[in-house]
């Protein structure tokens, strides 16, 4: 079957058509040759995975300390100032403790998110050609499938939770030691504790992210230079990330609570939520404690990811 030409709402160009030329004067001849060479080696499909991975790497290095403050608020329901004091007591050498799991997990999941979304979209659009199925349906299914596939890497979130929880500092030394301990003492199943809230979060959030990314960017002022494109991509990704972060915040609270437990029965997601709800006095404000910090972190994180991804996609 021949290549189906479809419009990508995010980039404003057609799949299967050559990318529009970048604004002149931003890349030298050497940079352009290197970009062209990388693009040729990776191919059209592979570069979506690589760009997603590099975008996530940039984001994690910048925002990891902020994520630790947020995690403490989700887990203990404390104010941001108290969470910062906890990190100060832990010491500077522990500030980046637990960095490796999210670095491995996020660089892989964002690569899967963007790469599989493109691959599933291409496959499903070909299958749906001539059937009259609306493109938004096939793209929504593609986004949900990519989000579900990301959940395979839940063990990295699991280990990150244990390493960031100060109650486990004396038990788990590092990423490798934590994985070994969980597998040796409890088995593979323990690594997937908290899988249900991850699944409930990933699929719907991916559908909304990819479904709204194009329309939001089109609503922004028209970009005429690479810098303006970068700003628009940052605003678009940041706005979506912040909004979705608030929307799915209770699921992240449930995930953090479930994954902070080691051993014992696997408690249903709804029961964990009710336990947190009772502990926090049945207060919505307490349930969403840390949400304002999550909003700003997501605004920054997804702005960086989206802008970096789109920039790399243009230059490769």
Image: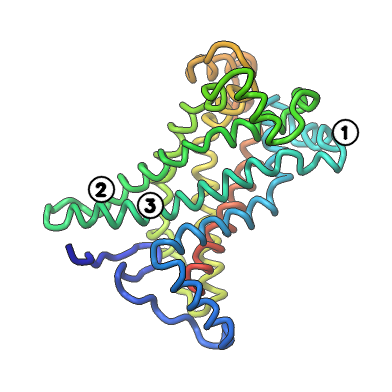
Labelled pair 2, 3 in contact (Cβ < 8 Å): no
Spatial separation of the CA atoms under disc 2 and disc 3: 13 Å
Which residue, as the protein is rendered here, is positioned at the far top?
265
Residue 95 or residue 149, whichever sits in front: 149
Depth order, front residue of 106/86: 106
- From this view, report whether residue 68 is shown above or below residue 209: above
- Which tag is nearer the camera, tag 1 or tag 3? 3
Front-lying residue, 189 or 99: 189
C-alpha distance separating marks 1 and 3: 42 Å
**For residue 123, which quarter of the picture?**
bottom left
Q: Earlier in the sequence, mark 1 or mark 3?
A: 1
Label annotation for residue 117: 3
Above or below 262: residue 150: below
Instruction: Report the side of 246 relative to 21 (left or right).
Output: right
Q: Point out the frontmost of discs 2 and 3.
A: 3
Circle 1 residue? 89
Q: Residue at x 64, y 32 (%)?
A: 159
Q: Residue at x 33, y 48 (%)?
A: 142
- Tell me the crowding category of disc 1: few under 14, some 14 to 19, or many 20 or more residues within 10 angstroms, Cα based: few
> Where is residue 89 shown, x and y percent of the image?
87, 33
Q: Is residue 158 left or right of residue 143?
A: right
- Tell me the distance, in whole angstroms, between the alpha carbons under discs 2 and 1: 50 Å
Q: Secondary structure at mark 1?
A: helix
> In the picture, which quadrant includes the N terminus?
bottom left
Spot occupied by residue 140 in the image (x, y as percentages of width and height): 32, 47
- Name the spot of residue 115 as percent of width and height, x first: 42, 55
Which mark sits nearer the N-terminus, 2 or 3? 3
Identify the element where label 2 is drawn: helix
User: Which residue position holds label 2?
Assistant: 137
- Figure check: 84 above or below 32: above
Q: Are marks 1 and 3 in contact (CB under 8 Å)?
A: no
What residue appears at the point 63 percent right and 47 percent down from the top-left corner?
103
């Amino acid at each position: 079957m021949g290549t189906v030409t479809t419009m990508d709402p995010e980039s404003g160009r057609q799949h299967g058509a050559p990318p529009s030329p970048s604004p002149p004067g931003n890349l030298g001849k050497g940079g352009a040759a290197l970009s062209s060479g990388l693009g040729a080696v990776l191919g059209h499909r592979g570069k979506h995975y690589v760009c997603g991975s590099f975008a996530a790497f940039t984001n994690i290095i910048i925002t990891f300390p902020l994520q630790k403050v947020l995690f403490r608020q989700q887990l203990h329901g404390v104010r941001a100032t108290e969470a910062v004091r906890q990190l100060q007591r832990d010491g500077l050498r522990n500030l980046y403790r637990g960095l490796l799991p999210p670095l491995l997990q996020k660089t892989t999941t964002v690569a899967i998110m963007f790469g599989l979304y493109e691959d599933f979209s291409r496959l499903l659009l070909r299958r749906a050609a001539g059937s009259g199925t609306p493109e938004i349906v096939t793209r929504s299914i593609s986004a949900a499938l990519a989000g579900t596939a990301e959940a395979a890497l839940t063990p990295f979130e699991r280990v990150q939770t244990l390493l960031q929880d100060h109650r486990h500092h004396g038990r788990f030394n590092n990423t490798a030691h934590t994985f070994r301990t969980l597998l040796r003492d409890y088995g593979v199943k323990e690594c997937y504790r908290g899988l249900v809230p991850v699944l409930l979060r990933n699929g719907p959030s991916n559908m909304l992210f990819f479904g709204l990314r194009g329309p939001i960017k089109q609503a922004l002022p028209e970009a005429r230079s690479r810098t303006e494109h970068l700003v628009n991509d940052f605003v678009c990704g940041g706005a979506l990330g912040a909004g979705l972060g608030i929307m799915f915040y209770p699921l992240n609270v449930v995930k953090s609570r479930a994954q902070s437990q080691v051993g014992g029965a696997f408690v249903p997601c709804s029961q964990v939520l009710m336990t947190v709800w009772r502990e926090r006095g049945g207060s919505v404000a307490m349930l969403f404690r840390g949400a304002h910090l999550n909003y700003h972190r997501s605004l920054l994180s997804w702005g960086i990811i989206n802008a970096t991804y789109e920039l790399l996609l243009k230059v490769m």
